[in-house]
Image: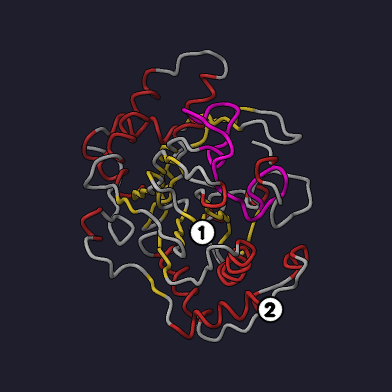
Amino acid sequence: MSDFEVYEGSAAWESMDFQTSDWIDVLAPEQRRELVDAASSLPEDDSQWLALKREDLHLPTLSPFLDKVNKGLEEGRGFAVLRGLDLPPAEIDFAYRVNWVLALGLGDVIAQNANGEVIGAVQAVTEADDNGMDTRGYVSNAELRFHCDGGDVASLLCVRQAPEGGSNSLVSMVSIHNAMVRECPDLLATLYRGLHMFMRKEGLLDSKVVPRQPLFFPQKNYLLGWVNLRLMELPYESTKTPMPAEERAALDALEEIAERSEYKLSLKLEPGDMLLTHNFVCMHKRSKFTDDPNKEKARLMLRLWYNLPESRVQAIQPANQRRGYFTQSPYVIRHRDPSSAET
């Protein structure tokens, strides 16, 4: 008999729970109008956006809608897809504006890289077969294996999609945990003990190995978790040291369960879709993609990390880790030339 608890509730979902599209949140016409009006009203100088707050925007119907989305992320299934955002394909600046209005409506935005960037352009600026010690996944076209990002929630706004590949997949960490309780509790115990994690060199920050931390955090009546498969392998690859057998077996079991069709929900975002993923409830991944040779038509997603008001994650995460990527740089909205960004 295992000593680990099996968790129930809406966060313990399986792929068959989403066979229809009624779980996708489509903005109503009035909500779209409010979003477009608010985006158009942002200052011309995007450095001024950082001083704005939700109360500075007129969102009488959109704000309650976003509050409901956040509640579903925090207390429900842990992910959401918003559809119906008005994004003219040739107006990338407007996509940034829409993204920032939604960010202000959803939570407390944090930096996602050492440059202090808050909206990251997810596009292939380097070819990579694998995301190793020197390449962060969002700048390549390689497959990204299951992982969690920074902040409570990661959002991904689709501006342009790849003609081939680039699908996103989600899996409930609660369901994976429950499967491991039933099938391999000894390996689950290894994940509770924790694994080291590799932080890549970026900007002025050197690479380093983060001390061992557990992958699952049981709380009263609910479970939180945080996993990054690739970053949990790199501490050993970086030192050319074999991963301990029990850690290798535990990560392999977790990934094998996550890849099962009964647990993995896959979708391909369309332009104007936004995927929101609670990083302590769900893992996500991306398939490899082939880009359009025309750079003006190449795949482009806008990524943003934010923390939720009154987040349950505060119980397990130190305050100094909740400000996002460790950086001393001033926060900036974006880099004008993503190809010149640090990787």
Residue beneath disc 2? 41
Question: Mark 1 is on which residue type?
Answer: Val
| Residue 204 occupies quadrant | top right
Residue 118 magenta:
yes
Where is residue 185 shown, x and y percent of the image?
28, 34
* For residue 223, side relative to residue 97 (left or right): left
Which residue is painted at 29% across and 47% down in the image?
264
Foreground disc of the pair 1, 2: 1
- The Cα atoms of the two marked residues, 1 and 2, are separated by 20 Å
Front residue of 31 and 88: 88
| Residue 72 occupies quadrant | bottom left
Magenta range: 111-140
| Residue 303 occupies quadrant | bottom right
Which residue is painted at 69% across and 73% down in the image?
53
Q: How many marks?
A: 2
* For residue 127, side relative to residue 224 (left or right): right
Count neighbours of disc 2 (C-alpha within 10 A) and say few if under 14, some if 14 to 19, many if 20 or more.
few
Which residue is painted at 66% across and 55% down in the image?
118
Where is residue 294 shown, x and y percent of the image?
53, 46
